[in-house]
């Protein structure tokens, strides 16, 4: 059996501590969707988009009329962003907790464990759910881009290319999952023959 160095074990433990802290703060991110709904209720969505630091103005000269500001679909924007952020936070928590399980198993020197297979599957599924969340956020960000020529550069800055990026990550994680699952089957077969 391989013996893990003290430095590697200490590094894994540090990563797991920071990962657990990140999970805690991700739970706090469930407040953000309510902020978007509050902004819609109070009628400040347009003002937030036009004056917020999270939105960058596209190049060129753009004049936004009062009629455009009045006709902006604030509620669909707020609902799309709230749903997208909530789904993304949930999937991010699932992804990070599965990763922490894998790191804990590695630290305990359980390299080939069925828990790792389950955790990898959870990571793949969470990444696919993030693609769905990206569709909601990209739709909302498309509204602010089309109506006000503002590009969201803040927390929920998903665009259409982000959907494809996350899909590529899901495919890569899926390949790792299938490879690891196959390695586990070969190991189980070798354990029976010895």
Image: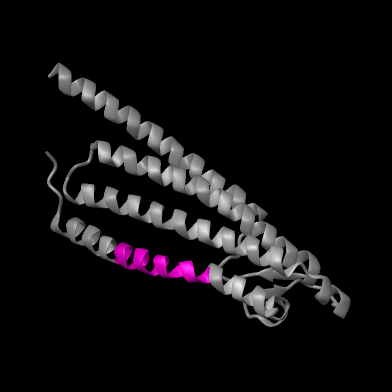
x 70%, y 67%: residue: 75
x 60%, y 71%: residue: 36
Q: Is residue 30 left or right of residue 25?
A: right
The picture quadrant where one finds residue 39 is: bottom right
Q: Is residue 42 left or right of residue 6?
A: right
Q: Position of residue 179 (x, y in %)?
A: 37, 32
Q: Does 26 appear in magenta?
A: yes
Q: Quadrant of the C terminus?
A: top left
Q: Is residue 72 left or right of residue 35?
A: right
The picture quadrant where one finds residue 145 is: bottom right
x 69%, y 57%: residue: 139
Q: Does 108 appear above or below 84?
A: above
Q: Does 81 appear above or below 117?
A: below
Question: In the image shown, does 133 or 33 lie closer to the viewer?
Answer: 33
* Secondary structure, magenta segment, majority class: helix
Q: Quadrant of the N terminus?
A: top left
Q: Residue reaching furthest top?
A: 193
x 41%, y 65%: residue: 26
Q: Does 81 appear above or below 194?
A: below
Q: Position of residue 16 (x, y in %)?
A: 27, 60
Question: In the image shown, does 168 or 156 lie closer to the viewer?
Answer: 156
**Range covered by the magenta-colored residues:** 18-32
Looking at the rendered structure, the number of numbered marks drawn on it comes to 0
């Amino acid at each position: 059996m391989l013996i893990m160095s003290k430095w590697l074990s200490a590094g894994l433990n540090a990563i797991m501590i920071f990962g657990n802290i990140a999970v805690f703060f991700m739970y706090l991110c469930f407040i953000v969707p309510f902020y978007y709904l509050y902004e819609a209720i109070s009628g400040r969505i347009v003002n937030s988009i036009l004056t917020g630091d999270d939105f960058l103005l596209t190049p060129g000269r753009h004049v936004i009329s009062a009629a455009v500001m009045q006709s902006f679909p604030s509620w669909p924007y707020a609902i799309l962003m709230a749903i997208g952020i909530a789904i993304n936070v949930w999937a991010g928590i699932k992804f990070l907790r599965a990763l922490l399980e894998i790191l804990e198993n590695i630290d305990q020197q359980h390299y080939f464990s069925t828990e790792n297979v389950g955790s990898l599957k959870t990571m793949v599924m969470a990444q696919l759910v993030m693609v769905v969340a990206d569709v909601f956020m990209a739709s909302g960000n498309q509204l602010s881009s089309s109506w006000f020529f503002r590009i969201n550069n803040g927390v929920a800055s998903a665009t259409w290319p982000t959907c494809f990026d996350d899909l590529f990550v899901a495919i890569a994680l899926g390949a790792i999952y299938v490879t690891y699952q196959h390695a586990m089957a070969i190991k189980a077969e070798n354990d029976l023959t010895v």
